[in-house]
Amino acid sequence: MKEVIVSTRYGAVRGYEVDDLKVWKGVPYAEAPVGPLRFGAPRPPRPWTGVRDATQYGPVAMQSPTPGMFGGPPYLNQSEDCLTLNIWAPAGADGPRPVMVWIHGGAFVSGSGSAPWYDGASLARDGPIVVVTFNYRLGPFGFLFLEDIGGPAYRGSGNVGILDQLWALKWIHDNINQFGGDPEQVTVVGESAGSMSVGTLMTMPAAQGLFHRAIMESGVPLFRTRAAASAVTQAVIQHLGLRNPRIADLESLPAHDLLAAALEVRGDGVLPWAPMVDGLSIVESFWPAQGRAWSATVPLLIGSNHDELWLWAAMNPAWQQLSDHEMLATFEAQWGPMRSAVRDFYLSGKTGPRLFDALMELGTHYAFWYPTVRLASIHSMRAPTWVYRFDWRSTANNGLLRACHALEIPFVFNTLDAAGVVQVTGDDPHRYQVAQHMHQAWLQFIMRGDPNIPELPRWPRYDVHDRPVMTINQESCIEWDPDGTARQLWDAVIAHSAEE
């Protein structure tokens, strides 16, 4: 393993070369957001002299240390000084290579760019492309809205986690050529909260020119209102036991105390920590913004998984043992009350296990599948758009997870042998073929703006007439307007809501 030194605009970094790849880890893309910078927009990293070591991942953002589903031990190495990125580049590649930038998920409260599932080696080698992952501020450190306390200077405080992402893209634009990447061929990719982040960036004028293609996996933005963000802030203040707090009090508060208070807050929605309409970086709610988004012509690959909600079912198995009434109450407590038309369509005449299955389908359609095809319908009128649905079912835990939320990630990265993956996917040997196909299709889109590969059926662009969807499975195929009756129901629900 030999060292590889590269100069950035802020100083030189030392990575390493191994197995025909060059790797740099823990490269700072912004100044540490500590002290008076805790709730502020990111700033350029402070230049350094000499050569900075970049052979180890940096600390992850502050979050609960509970281990997630993405492998490895609990995130114990946490710090507010977390704004770093990681780069994998093919050794000896001719000319600048296309760049993939991965934004991790985790409901804006957990995760990191260094999770084993997100190792960029296979993508970088097989493209060949340059792969970048990074951390951004989470929970109260990235999304605590403080204008009510600090005045106009803190108007944008509820979105600094998104501004971190924007700043990482700026750093990549300015420096990635030094690592063999082409700043004019950047594809931004994300899953869950990462996918919501991609959609958010697509509405932000400041992101124009920083990426040129987009992939969204299982998540469409839902912006908080100012009122909702303010309510979350007040709940945090209450849990901290502060009276008439000042910004200085919150800036000097021990990070673990702030995190502990934030973990107690549930908010009035599924994601209490998420981007918000602040009138600065995000000026309007997501769906109206589509008509004026700068990204109208950006090629888009978008999709979701067939059984998204079964991840949460597996995390709370007692849910399935409840009475029918308790099941419905639990569901509506998290997702909100159902309209009668929705209840009739999904739940009529069902009880016990069949009712539970129907609730999982309802939640999957409501939170993932319908927003996916709704956005695809809008975007396809102005830009090349492809839609997928990941149907391959996990065999782990006697098939409990099905094709659940986040299951597709190690198939995209081709990291099926990474730590913790087999516990989620199961050990069916056919999974390697599915991964190879998905991995190659994503690479084709990143490199050429079209996911078609010889190993899969021809994948037509999405349009609002035929609605072709690539269903990815051991035997992948094109389905035309899958779950079309449910889509029409949700179209009617949205239209009715707009009239109220």
Image (spheres, rainbow, N blue to C red):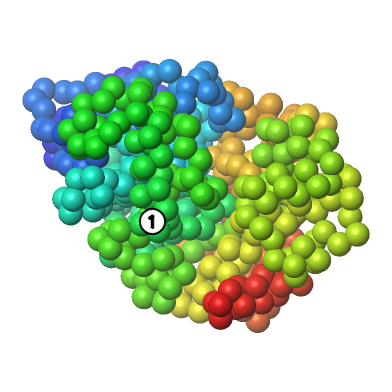
- Does any portion of residue 177 appear in the rendered image? no
Residue farthest front in this picture = 243
Residue assigned mark 1: 227
Task: Report x, y in % for residue 14.
Answer: 24, 25
Task: Report x, y in % for residue 462.
Answer: 60, 72
Q: Which residue is at 56% across, 77% downward?
A: 500
Q: Amino acid type of disc 1?
A: Ala
**Would you place residue 429 above or below residue 369 in this image?**
above
Screen quadrant of the N terminus: top left
Task: Report x, y in % for residue 369.
Answer: 64, 60
Task: Report x, y in % for residue 372.
Answer: 58, 62
Q: Which residue is at 46% across, 78% downward?
A: 382
Q: Is residue 416 rendered to the left or right of residue 360?
A: left
Q: Which residue is at 47% across, 22% downward?
A: 65
Q: Which residue is at 55% across, 48% downward?
A: 270
Q: Is residue 12 rendered to the left or right of residue 475?
A: left
Residue farthest left in this picture = 49
Callout 1: 10 Å neighbours few (<14), some, many (20+)? few
- Image quarter of residue 136: top left
Q: Tell which of 218 and 145 is nearer to you.
A: 145
**Would you place residue 251 above or below residue 281 in this image?**
above
Q: Is residue 484 rendered to the left or right of residue 236?
A: right
Dot 1 falls on a residue whose secondary structure is helix
- Does any portion of residue 46 appear in the rendered image? yes
**Would you place residue 161 above or below residue 487 in this image?**
above
